Image (spheres, rainbow, N blue to C red):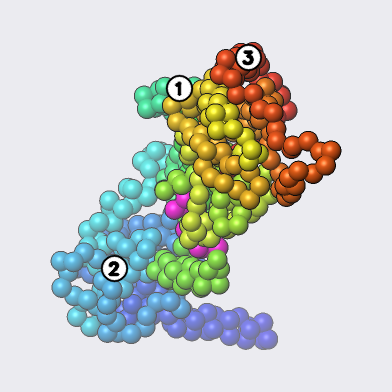
Amino acid sequence: MKKILFIFLLITTMSFSQEMVQVDLSNPNATIYTHLYFLQSDSFEPSKAAKTIYGLPNDKAISKALKIKEVFDGKGLFVKFEDISKDANYVDTLDTAVNELKKSFHRFAPFPNKMPQIYVEKIGNNWYYSKETVENIEEIYQETFPWQFTWIQNKFPEFFQTIVYGIKIWQPIGALILILLGVILYFILDPILFFILRKIQRIFYKDIFENLFDLLHELARPIGFIIIINVLERLLPSLQLLRLNNFLFLGLSVAETIFWMFVFLKLSNLLLSIYANYSLKTETKLDEQLTPILSKLIKVVIILIGFLHILTVFGVNATAVIAGASIGGIAIAFAAQDSVKNLIGTIMIFLDKPFQIGDWIKIGTNEGSVERVGLRSTQLRAADTTIFQIPNSKITESEINNMGLRLFRRYSTQLGIRYDTPPDLIQAFVNGIRKLIVEHPETRSESYNVEFTGFGDSALLILVNVYFKKLDWGSEQSSKHRLHMGIVKLAKALNVEFAFPSSTIMIEQFPDKNTISMNYKTDSKYVDSNIQSVIDEFNKIEPKKDPNASSISDD
């Protein structure tokens, strides 16, 4: 008696449960729920699901309803009923689901981003799948499911419908076929894509440099994976793995985004390598320094864009992502104003090019040779090998004295000779220095000054102003040395003495003391002969080349 009562209660409960779900077309949520509920395996009543199709005979409506469900399953689109409106008068204010020619705005698309062609709309007092959805479902179905898989299922319907452990036997077979197809495509596409990239490279850039082929191979591989992913996305709906398809499509979308990031990263490496090879042929060394900076900037931008796209793949609203990125960017900019200023300064340095690598520059109190221009700062090495790290924002705001752009190095000094030097000997000494400058191989013989310019406290002043041809610091010191030695020898030969700070007491008629006057020889033949001998000796001097001489530039 108890068993009979239990069976009766069970049958009653099941009957009551079946009666609980009725065809309801009063709002978007009810219509979509009615359609999907009556096509489930445990509640399969396609005639009731067909009620959501308006204006078609029952058999055609059932076909349309089944195909809409199969498209959802094939695309891995899982309906979240909590996100579907229950408002009977719902209005789509964004109008993203349908074209602009529709007059009715009472419509709802369950997947406005992934499948905007399928939506429900209000007709009279009820909600149905739209006329556009019904008309286009055949085309959408053909796009979703390739004809090959449809043909196989139709050719062997009984075999493919066999269910083992809840899975149709054709589904794991199809999955293995897709995996095998992906492996075959990889080995086929890799050499083909490399060949195509090589052809493109020969058209636009004919030079060959180190690692070029490696870079082309690295670019070909992710492109091949993207093609394989697109093929799999095209064929995957045919497996009809329902919810599993949703995770598979999500994983493929993330993988495709990552491979696109690799493509752009490898492409940037290739283009920057081409630019680096080109920059080696340019006169300015600053172009070579631009390559690592551009590499860092491009990598940051590519990774950031890829990360934002992955967020949209996981369902984050694209507008919200862009807005968040903008607000976050502003917040970061305010928090890191100095870094932003330095970045702008870096851009201005490469645009204006006020100096290049190796130039000797002076910025404020800092002076040295430019060794590196980074993303944030510029590195100077002083004459004592000290390193200065100067923020690029400060450089763009400061006055830059680029001594490396000089055509010649100016050297100016004053010679002080004794006050009792005879005028003729002063002129001979000046003429001799002029000849030394003309004969010097590293001075500009057409531009110099050697003049008796004034009277000092303890000496007669002779200005020596010359211009050296070599710009590096070591060569300048060697040129000075040769000129100085020539002047000292000339002074000795002419018996001209250099003065030093002194006081002279003149005591006339001092007993037993001779006069302090110098015995100068001013005979013209004697003077000319000694000057010529000094010039001849000066021309015989070969400048010594020090292999360890510093190449640091100084003024």
As drawn, is 402 to the left or to the right of 164? left
Q: Give the main secondary structure of the magenta stretch.
A: helix
Q: Which residue type does callout 3 highlight?
A: Ser
Q: Which residue type does callout 1 highlight?
A: Asp
Check if mark 1's residue and mark 3's residue have beta carbons within 8 Å. no
Up the image or down, 529 lies above or below 34; here it is above
Up the image or down, 3 lies above or below 463; here it is below
Label placed on residue 258: none
Q: According to the image, label 2 marks what residue?
A: 96
Ranked by sequence position, the earlier of labels 1 and 2 is: 2
Q: According to the image, label 1 marks what residue?
A: 207
Q: Where is residue 500? Give x, y as percent.
A: 71, 44
| In the foreground, 525 or 18 | 525
Q: Where is residue 509? Give x, y as percent.
A: 76, 43
Of helix, strand and loop, which one carries label 2? loop
Q: According to the image, label 3 marks what residue?
A: 533
To which quarter of the image does residue 541 belong? top right
Q: Marks 1 and 2: which is nearer the front?
A: 1
